[in-house]
Amino acid sequence: MMKKYEEGKRILKKDATGLSFVNRKLQKEIERDIEECLKKQQEEIDQVVEELKIAVNIKFNSLSEFKIFIVKNVSLNIIS
């Protein structure tokens, strides 16, 4: 998960750098807001993952059973 966080941070920082016409103080504020947003987003993702783990453990007897359920019930629509 940390890799995605760092990649998101890099992308958003690049976008913030594009605001070079904004004064330095405001740029720092934007960077701080971006950092806070990414941390909050990561916490929310971690919470969803944890809730999903709990739900899977309640519903399925094993990881194999869950994998079989996924294979049988998930379909991918590939748009080319």
Image (cartoon, rainbow, N blue to C red):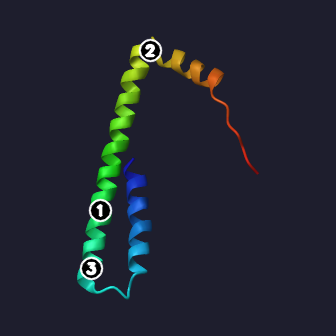
**First in residue order: circle 2 vs circle 1:** 1
Residue type, numbered disc 3 = Leu
Q: Is residue 30 left or right of residue 6?
A: left
Residue drawn at (27%, 79%) of the image: 26
Residue drawn at (63%, 23%) of the image: 73
Q: Quadrant of residue 39?
A: bottom left
* Mark 1 secondary-structure assignment: helix
Q: What residue does disc 1 label?
A: 35
Residue sitting nearer the eye, 21 or 3: 21
Residue density around tag 3, few if under 14, some if 14–19, many if 20 or more, within 10 Å: few
Query: Which residue reaches farthest left?
Result: 25
Residue drawn at (43%, 21%) of the image: 56
* Mark 3 secondary-structure assignment: helix
Q: Is residue 53 above or below residue 24?
A: above
Q: Quadrant of residue 20?
A: bottom left
3D distance between C-alphas at marks 1 and 3: 14 Å
The picture places residue 21, in percent across and down from the top left corner, at 37, 88
3D distance between C-alphas at marks 2 and 1: 36 Å
* Mark 2 secondary-structure assignment: helix
**First in residue order: circle 3 vs circle 2:** 3
The picture places residue 19, in percent across and down from the top left corner, at 39, 81
Residue drawn at (35%, 31%) of the image: 50
Q: What residue does disc 2 label?
A: 59
Residue sitting nearer the eye, 19 or 13: 19
The picture places residue 13, in percent across and down from the top left corner, at 38, 71
Residue type, numbered disc 2 = Lys
Q: Are marks 2 and 1 in contact (CB under 8 Å)?
A: no
Residue type, numbered disc 1 = Glu
Q: What residue does disc 3 label?
A: 26
